[in-house]
């Protein structure tokens, strides 16, 4: 992978001028190895699912089911799987023993008690399953965008993810939310019904609320906390700030 790490800047220069479909094809054909896409069924991920289904370049798709999802998330999961036949979405769950240990020690809703307890819950329900999902992967495709939060403004299209020892690809990096919505409407891409109710960033049900007018994109996630709002899935982003 050292060869790839040395080529990342060159590849990023190429990606600057490519369309989304062209960018997916370029990475799929240029960087060898196993490629995976993680979806949480947010509007960005739904857009990428649509194009990955069309590209069909052996990109595996997975999702993390924390056990505390909104029912609306399962509904759009079902619609997505029925619409995009070229894709089979694999589900990764937290280990039962880890969840039991957390609940016994912190309480069923212990994540409200402190930032430390909340991050511990995210670690059990998201980070550990993610590690399993990324085993053997060489490229991890995400729906992250720079305008989503200050923590993500310094991202690049391609980055070396030291924590997971792979290349991270953020094809929607410079897209605005308005551009995302325009493409989703153009292709009639299914989205989570909560999105139109103000849930622009949708995570676990107990930890997500609708945004109020003028609030930051991530304000509805862990709304009782202040400061940076990341769950640990994209920890290297925090390290860059």
Image (cartoon, rainbow, N blue to C red):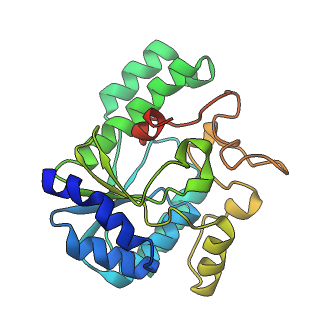
Q: Position of residue 209 (x, y in %)?
A: 71, 44
The residue at 26%/42% (across/down) is: 164
Q: Is residue 220 visible?
A: yes
Q: Residue at x 35, y 74 (%)?
A: 24
Q: Where residue 87 sits: x, y (%)? A: 33, 74
Q: Is residue 206 above or below residue 157?
A: above
Identify the residue shown where x is 39% and y is 30%.
124
Between 96 and 230, which is closer to the camera in this rendering? Answer: 230
Residue 84 visible in this rendered orientation of the protein: no
Using the image, determine if residue 215 lies above or below residue 46. Answer: above
x and y, in percent, of residue 47 in the image:
51, 72
Farthest residue in the right direction? 213
Residue 197 place in picture, x, y as percent: 76, 59
Residue pushed farthest top?
Answer: 105
Residue closer to the observer: 76 or 4: 4
Q: As drawn, is 198 to the left or to the right of 230?
A: right
132 vs 87, left or right, is left
**Camera-nearest residue between 218 and 193:** 218
Q: Quadrant of residue 239?
A: top left
Above or below, 56 against 70 in this view is: below
Residue nearer the viewer, 148 or 186: 148
């Amino acid at each position: 992978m050292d060869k790839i790490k040395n080529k990342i800047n060159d590849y990023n220069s190429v990606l600057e001028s490519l369309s989304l479909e062209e960018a997916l094809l370029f990475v799929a054909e240029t960087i060898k190895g196993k490629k995976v896409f993680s979806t949480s069924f947010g509007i960005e991920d739904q857009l990428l699912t649509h194009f990955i289904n069309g590209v069909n370049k052996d990109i595996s798709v997975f999702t993390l089911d924390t056990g505390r999802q909104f029912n609306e998330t399962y509904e759009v999961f079902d619609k997505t799987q029925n619409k995009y036949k070229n894709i089979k979405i694999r589900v990764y769950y937290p280990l039962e023993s880890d969840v039991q240990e957390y609940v016994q020690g912190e309480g069923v809703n212990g994540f409200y008690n402190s930032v430390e307890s909340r991050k511990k819950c995210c670690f059990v329900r998201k980070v550990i399953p993610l590690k399993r999902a990324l085993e053997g992967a060489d490229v991890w495709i995400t729906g992250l965008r720079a305008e989503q939060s200050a923590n993500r403004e310094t991202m690049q299209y391609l980055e070396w993810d030291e924590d997971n020892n792979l290349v991270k690809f953020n094809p929607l990096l410079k897209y605005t939310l308005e551009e995302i919505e325009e493409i989703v409407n153009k292709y009639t891409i299914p989205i989570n019904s909560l999105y139109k109710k103000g849930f622009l960033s949708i995570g676990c049900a107990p930890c997500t609320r609708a945004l109020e007018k003028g609030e930051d994109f991530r304000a509805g996630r862990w709304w009782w906390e202040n400061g940076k709002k990341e769950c640990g899935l994209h920890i290297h982003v925090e390290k860059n700030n």
